[in-house]
Image: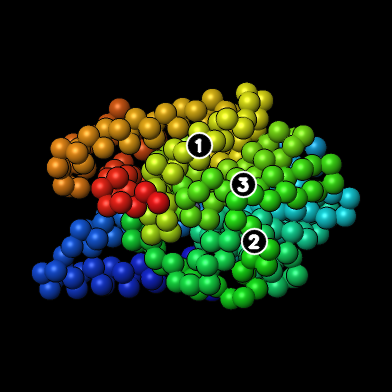
């Protein structure tokens, strides 16, 4: 399977291809995007490899582990731990140690919020140990094939069979972990076409994956069926299902409240509207970037690994190329 290090070597490969395209005079917008976007995966990789692994208690028997890729949530029952996401592969044994230290129970089930490497990197490790992997059905499709995300200069997969979900669902599914009921829901394509939101009750925790990046511009994986309209649609559904007391676990960043999620949704909706105006006015993608429609949001949201210009390119393409699936 692809590791972060192999992602780096793939980046070199992508760079070589892009340079070749530029030299041969066939530089396309896609090539330009790949050049711009390389730093996204580089920044993310550096962050995931160097951040300390932090354990946060969310409720009795529920923890969040952060730092090793996407946030990981653990819910305990009498004799087992259920995980939501599995971080990056290079840090899975460190993650497993931290999980056991907190829960003192073996992991028996693993839910993936979607199929990106920083959320499923531990799947081989846990799948090889006999853990049942559960995901929306499209995750299985993506992990079984090569994934290519040109906006962030990323290629990944195909994953070995042990990493693949063995239990899948289409629209929703319910699991029980002792006293906690877990409702898994897919509201249609958003960040990818295989997103799962997990509502945990009565704890009142919502694990929303990369539909929410706290506190920075998100990746919208158009090549895996994601779209800006789908992101906003899913966020509206999540807002309708949560209250002011809900603890919201984002794909990345600290635990948030419903009002944090509302601010993020409103930011996305405003930027979508501004970029839509640029698309309707016949601007090119470069002209849209040059117009800096994100300007007044950048201080708050532009400090993560998705730079404002990459974000504008993703939204522009989502709105202009009929990728709103
Ligand atoms: Zn993701």
Using the image, tell me which numbered label, if any, was put on residue 248.
none
Task: For marks 2 and 3, give the CA distance.
Answer: 12 Å
Mark positioned earlier in the residue sequence (2 or 3): 2
**Image color mode:** rainbow
Q: At x 32% / y 48%, what residue is drawn?
A: 318
Residue 149: x and y in percent read 38, 61
Q: At x 12% / y 73%, what residue is drawn?
A: 24
Residue 81 vs residue 10, the one in the foreground: 81
Q: Which residue is mark 3?
A: 185
Q: Is residue 6 above or below residue 108?
A: below
| Residue closest to the far right | 78
Nearer to us of marks 1 and 2 is: 2
Q: Is mark 1 within 8 Å of ligand 1?
A: no
Marks 1 and 2 in Cβ contact (< 8 Å): no
- Disc tally is 3
Quadrant containing the N terminus in the rendered view: bottom right
Mark 3 residue element: strand
Q: Which residue is mark 2?
A: 168
Q: Is residue 17 visible?
A: yes
Task: For marks 3 and 1, give the CA distance.
Answer: 12 Å
Mark positioned earlier in the residue sequence (1 or 2): 2
Mark positioned earlier in the residue sequence (3 or 1): 3
* Mark 2 burial class by Cα count in 10 Å: few <14, some 14-19, many 20+: some
Task: For marks 1 and 2, give the CA distance.
Answer: 22 Å
Q: Residue 316 falls in which quadrant of the image?
A: top left
Q: Is residue 18 left or right of residue 224?
A: left
Q: Which residue is mark 1?
A: 235
Mark 2 residue element: strand
């Amino acid at each position: 399977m692809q590791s972060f290090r192999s992602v780096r070597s793939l980046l070199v490969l992508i760079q070589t291809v892009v340079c070749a395209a530029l030299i041969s005079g066939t530089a396309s917008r896609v090539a330009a995007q790949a050049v711009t976007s390389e730093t996204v995966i580089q920044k993310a990789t550096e962050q995931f490899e160097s951040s300390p692994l932090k354990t946060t208690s969310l409720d009795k028997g529920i923890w969040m582990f952060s730092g090793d890729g996407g946030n990981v949530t653990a819910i305990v029952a009498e004799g087992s731990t259920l995980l939501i996401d599995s971080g990056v592969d290079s840090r899975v044994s460190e993650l497993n140690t931290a999980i056991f230290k907190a829960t003192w129970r073996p992991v028996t089930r693993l839910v993936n919020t979607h199929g990106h490497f920083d959320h499923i990197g531990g799947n081989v490790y846990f799948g090889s140990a006999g853990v049942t992997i559960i995901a929306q059905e499209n995750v299985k499709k993506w992990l079984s094939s090569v994934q290519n995300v040109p906006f962030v200069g990323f290629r990944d997969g195909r994953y070995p069979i042990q990493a693949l979900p063995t239990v899948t669902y289409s629209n929703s599914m319910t699991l029980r972990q002792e006293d906690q009921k877990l409702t898994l829901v897919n509201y249609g394509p958003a960040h990818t076409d295989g997103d799962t939101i997990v509502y945990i009750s009565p704890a009142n925790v919502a694990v929303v994956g990369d539909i929410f990046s706290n506190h920075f511009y998100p990746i919208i994986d158009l090549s895996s069926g994601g779209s800006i309209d789908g992101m906003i649609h899913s966020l509206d559904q999540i807002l309708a299902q949560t209250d002011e007391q809900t603890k919201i676990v984002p794909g990345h960043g600290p635990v948030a409240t419903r009002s944090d999620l509302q601010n993020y949704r409103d930011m996305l909706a405003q930027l979508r509207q501004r970029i839509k105006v640029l698309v309707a006015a016949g601007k090119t993608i470069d002209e849209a970037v040059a117009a800096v429609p994100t300007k007044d949001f950048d201080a708050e949201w532009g400090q993560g690994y998705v730079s404002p210009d990459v974000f504008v390119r993703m939204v522009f393409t989502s709105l202009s190329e009929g990728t709103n699936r």
